[in-house]
Amino acid sequence: MLPDATEQNRIFEYVKTCRRQLHAIPELSECEFETSEYIAKRLTELGLKFTKIHTGMYADIDGESPGERIALRCDMDGLPIEEKTDSEFRAKKNMHACGHDGHMAIVLGTAKWLSEHKPRCGVRLIFQFGEEGDGGADKMIKAGVLDGVDEIYAFHLCPELEKGKLSSVCGAMFAGTAEFDVEVCGKASHCADREKGADAFVACKMFADECETTEKQRTDIRIHIGKAEIGSARNIVADKGRLFCTFRYFDVSSRDSVLSSLSAALTRIDARAGTQSRIAVKAVYPPLVNSAAALKRLKSVANVEDCEPRYTAEDFAFYTEKIDGCMAWLGIKDEKYCSPLHSDTFGFKESALMTGVQTMIKLVCDNDNGEDNVENI
């Protein structure tokens, strides 16, 4: 237990130090080499053995009761953003603009407590690489990071939620994504004789209209065309075009049906425009679905408000696709900090992180009868 203010302050100072040191060394996805060395050093200092998976790692802590093991996950990578805060520990290159420095500090603070106080159940601390990249969670799962794990939990900092508050939702919390390109092959001709060509621009426009119509017919999806590369000159009928698209959904069944519908529409468009086209799916992320059981456990140890699902994606979804789990927003908004995630002025007070540390400790230290095995931090 944490018997006095001195002990509580000791954990907070550790979390604050970790966060600030990690904030100063952000690295891009799958290149978190210095970050990995830092975490390895901290775990070693705490007497915890760890297993490396590329730049990521996990450490196991045995509990009083054999059998159950709960995983606590954080992400490690930063973003290619130039920081524009007035922080004395701001990064010189790249930026932890999505709060991953805070996520790591929470798990390290929890690790410090658990290295000194045996948890009720087994615990796996997961430090995941590549959340902002190409599915780091999926790669760690394939390397065995979930082997022997029963449930998994994580927090994500939220600048729209008041500091220290938690929020989550049962079911889909973040959208699944299907990133796809539409590749259109037409026939070039001079615009003066455009009837001799097959206009890829026209086909692309028709497909964009089809996406808009499809989205309007549903209330649970979003289809967005963010970039287009079409044609070669102003006076030439475009002989090729490419649309860069993303499809967001909360129900897995929607993914296949909508993509199939769009593919059929593209066939009809080709028949009208005289083009030849195809949809090339580049990447697929599942929706992040919080299990009812995991959310119930989280609510048994903390006050968790309800929130609305978001169309953004989060690769924690790969974990909850395999086992029961729950992610919750952790509020950081106060009178100074309210910049959005992925912005160059994003920041927060480290004191907000202690709600995350306290909750993670309670998740793995509370007795089955609901009696706390840890005081408020």
Image (cartoon, rainbow, N blue to C red):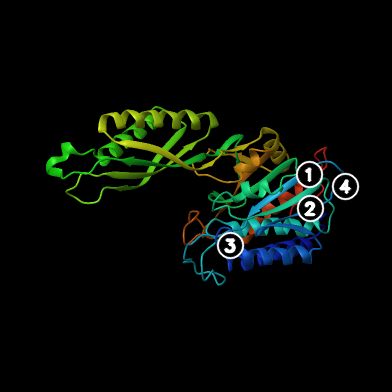
- Choose top left, top right, bottom left or bottom right for residue 348: bottom right
Residue 219 visible (yes or no) = no
- Choose top left, top right, bottom left or bottom right for residue 278: top left
Q: Nearer the viewer, residue 57 or 356?
A: 57
Residue 154 spot, x, y in % from top left: 65, 48
Relative placement, left or right, of 85 versus 56 is left
Mark pair 4, 2: CA separation: 13 Å
Mark pair 3, 1: CA separation: 29 Å
Q: Which residue is mark 2?
A: 60
- Choose top left, top right, bottom left or bottom right for residue 153: top right
331 above or below 290?
below
Relative placement, left or right, of 71 versus 135 is right
Among the two numbered marks 3 and 1 on one chain, the one whose residue lies closer to the N terminus: 3
Residue 220 spot, x, y in % from top left: 47, 32
Closer mark to the observer between disc 3 and disc 2? 3
Q: Which residue is mark 3?
A: 31
- For the residues labelled 4 and 1, say whether their Cβ atoms are less than 8 Å apart: no
Q: Which mark is residue 64?
A: 4
Residue 355 spot, x, y in % from top left: 67, 52
Residue 275 spot, x, y in % from top left: 29, 36
Q: Secondary structure at mark 1?
A: strand
Where the N terminus falls, by quadrant? bottom right
